[in-house]
Amino acid sequence: MSRLFECKRCGHCCHGESTVSIQKDEQGRIAAYLDLELDIFLNKFCVKKGARIEMRATDGHCVFYGGDGLCAIHPVKPAPCRIWPLHRSILDDPMAWEAIKADCPGFPEGSAYEKICELIRSHDAED
Ligand code: SF4
Ligand code: SF4
């Protein structure tokens, strides 16, 4: 991605008792990637939380987090997983940057807030 950020594959962002929301188009893409009918994918790998659909958590991590520390659906993972940890909230709030940095070891020691903002803006410009 950049020397300003390098994923250490620690898996921290894939752990927890809940995961991220999956949008309708993403559900279809992931089901197709797994070669499953949409309803089978939803029943087997997802949970409904109010109006949201999210991936199941099992053994304290996302069902797609592999024993090798990698994401089993990496090419089609949901948008929040693709974006993390370069979340746009960082641009509006240095405290958000501090919180995300504390949660993710992929930022080198002494990373500067402004440099990370530039990196996020450059990604936005590519979209
Ligand atoms: S917490 Fe950061 S370094 Fe660890 S797997 Fe997630 S993105 Fe990579
Ligand atoms: S879809 Fe992949 S990247 Fe996203 S939480 Fe699950 S294992 Fe992690």
Image: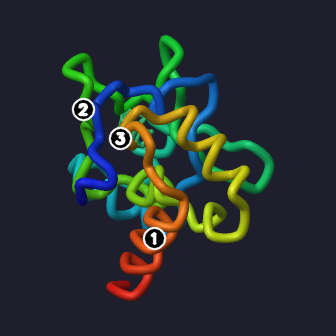
Left or right of 70? Residue 124 is right
Circle 2 SS class: loop
Pick the front one: 42 or 14 = 14
Answer above or below: position of 95 versus 86: above
> In the image, residue 34 lies at what x, y percent?
24, 47
When asked about the image quadrant of residue 94, the answer is bottom right
Answer above or below: position of 19 versus 59: below
Pick the front one: 107 or 123 = 107
Give the residue number, with chain letter if any, for mark 3.
Answer: 108
State whether residue 74 appears in this view. yes
Mark closest to the chain's N terminus, 1 or 3: 3
Left or right of 121? Residue 122 is left
When asked about the image quadrant of residue 118, the answer is bottom left
Other residues around mark 2 within 10 Å, as few (<14) / some (14–19) / many (≥20): some
- The kind of residue tagged 1 is Ile
Q: Are marks 1 and 3 in contact (CB under 8 Å)?
A: no
Extreme residue toward the top, this view: 59
Give the residue number, with chain letter if any, for mark 2.
Answer: 70
Answer above or below: position of 44 versus 37: above
Label 1 and label 3: CA atoms lie apart by 16 Å
Q: Please name which of the two marks, 2 or 3, marks the residue nearer to the observer.
A: 3
Pick the front one: 73 or 83 = 83
Label 2 and label 3: CA atoms lie apart by 21 Å
Other residues around mark 3 within 10 Å, as few (<14) / some (14–19) / many (≥20): few
Does the numbered disc 2 mark a residue whose Cβ is under 8 Å from ligand 2?
no
- The kind of residue tagged 3 is Pro
Give the residue number, with chain letter if any, for mark 1.
Answer: 120
- Determine the quadrant in which ligand 1 lies: top left
Which quadrant, please, contains the C terminus? bottom left
